[in-house]
Image (cartoon, rainbow, N blue to C red):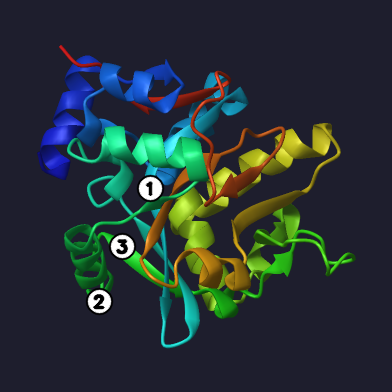
Amino acid sequence: MDEQQIEQLIAERGLTNAPCPLDEAYARLIPESIQEAHKIQRERIKDTGLRKGFFIVGNGCVYNVEEGESVLYFTNTALNPILKQENIADAVSQIRRNKYCIVKPEDFSLISKEAAKENGGAKRYVLSDLRLLPMHEDQPLLNNEYGSYKFYHPKYGELNNESQRSLAEQVHGQGEQFAEVLEAMINKVLLSFMTKEKIFILYPPFVKKIANDSPMAALGWLGDFGDPFFACIGRLDNVNDCVRGVLRP
């Protein structure tokens, strides 16, 4: 099913929020229709009712170690190895046990080929370029599994790091949509005294521990407008999370 067919399906049948656990939500939805982060953010500009939810999104977060560097591949729904029908059961089982799942060689081959294209379905990020701060910066002896970078909504135009901005735009949308989403967030977060967006990613040394032998995949998790964040380290069993897509017939 290509992008045009998916959009036609959405126009005809509409979108539904299917509550997690992921495998239960997945069973209710047409997999190809599962919405990516920037599409949900686009809806949130006008549909304020969507701003309160937390979503497991269609984007795949695939980590690998390449020439000594920790790397993130951020994919669209079609390339997300977790959401493929032939993978979903085993992927969910692995994530429940270990939080991440092994990516099959044939799936990673497709992802890396798409990332090599100018406008492919995946984009490659060297994690050192994202200048992540460890979660426990003041306690270096703790296991820093996650890192993050942040930017302040009123100053989003100052997000000049090319890699940081590129990933932020993949989450929130490009061009005018990026500005509109961030402006909408400003209005919401100022009311709750939170003015910054955080993007959480596995910290490079931790990636080298788990993905040194094989690429590993994690879920993408989108926060609400009251607690604005995106995490390339999503959860799958929280009943407060939803997956957004078209219901199966």
Label 3 SS: strand
Give the residue displayed 67% in from the left and 62% down from the top: 147
Q: CA distance from mark 1 to mark 2?
A: 17 Å
Disc 1 to disc 2: CB gap under 8 Å: no
Q: CA distance from mark 3 to mark 1?
A: 9 Å
Q: Is residue 122 above or below residue 17?
A: below
- The residue located at (57%, 69%) in the rendering is 164
Q: Position of residue 144 (x, y in %)?
A: 72, 62
Q: Which mark is residue 116?
A: 2
Labelled disc at residue 122: 3
**Is 180 located above or below residue 226 in the figure?**
below
Residue 93, numbered circle: none
* Residue of label 1: 59
- The three-letter code of the residue at mark 1 reads Asn
Residue at 56% across, 79% down: 129
- Give the alpha-carbon distance from disc 2 to disc 3, as whole Å: 8 Å
User: Label 2: how many residues lie within 10 Å, few (<14), some (14-19) or many (20+)?
Assistant: few
